[in-house]
Image (cartoon, rainbow, N blue to C red):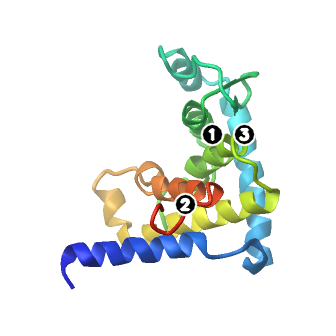
Amino acid sequence: MKPKEYMVAIARQLAERILSPAYAELPEKAVRWAKIGVLDTLGVTIAGAIEPCTSKALGVHGIADADGPSVLIGQGRRTSILDAAFINGIAAHAIDYDDVNNQIGGHPSVPIVPALFAFGDTVPISGEAAIAAYIVGFETETQIGLGVNYSHYAKGWHPTATIGIFGTVAVGARLLALSVEQT
């Protein structure tokens, strides 16, 4: 198999895994911990909403200036889905009390929970769909983390961002009901 074909096969398999598990198939323990993870991240996002880094990000011209469907947690207003995910992600990580996972060497919920809330304001989803998306996003991050850490971290990369994006994509793919090809 040629390298390009190999990469396409890996991407397809990852997309299939992201889209396949139904909520009913998820272990009860995973569902319980997912609910705790979402609630914990919401709590640190509320606390981080008043931190200087969040205020500075809100003050950048063009960031969160437009009205939109997605809530800026702790700000009393809404903005675009992308700006809400960005600003809420900053707030979630601002005080550094967010969860940590040694498999990714970073904070797995910070990239995915703000995306969950931003999508939840724009796409009709159930609580079960949100929890399933969280679990799949978390699992995507940790499995990729197993493949690259700790050398990835030792080289100076911050896995919350570099690996977290894959969890965020998994959340979006599920909540937008993308196909394997689109994912």
Say which amino acid is labelled 2.
Ala
Q: Are dots 2 and 3 in contact, CB under 8 Å?
A: no
Mark in front: 3 vs 1: 3
Numbered disc 1: secondary structure: helix
Instruction: Report, in whole angstroms, how far the alpha carbon at label 1 lies from the one at label 2.
Output: 19 Å
Any part of residue 69 in sight: yes
- Name the residue carrying label 2: 170
The residue located at (73%, 77%) in the rendering is 26
- Name the residue carrying label 3: 121
Query: Is residue 39 left or right of 165 when viewed as pictured?
Result: right
Query: Is residue 41 left or right of 152 when viewed as pictured?
Result: right
Q: Position of residue 164 (x, y in %)?
A: 49, 54
Q: Give the class, few, some or many, for how many residues have Cα within 10 Å of label 1's Cα (few <14, many ≥20).
A: many
Q: Earlier in the sequence, mark 3 or mark 1?
A: 1
Q: Where is residue 55 in the image (x, y as percent from the top left)?
A: 58, 19
Q: Where is residue 101 in the image (x, y as percent from the top left)?
A: 56, 62
Q: Are dots 1 and 2 in contact, CB under 8 Å?
A: no
Q: Residue 70 versus residue 123: which sits nearer the camera?
A: 123
Q: Residue furthest left?
A: 2
Say which amino acid is labelled 3.
Asp
Mark in front: 1 vs 2: 2
- Name the residue carrying label 1: 92
Q: Which of marks 1 and 2 is nearer the N terminus?
A: 1
Instruction: Report, in whole angstroms, how far the alpha carbon at label 3 lies from the one at label 1.
Output: 18 Å
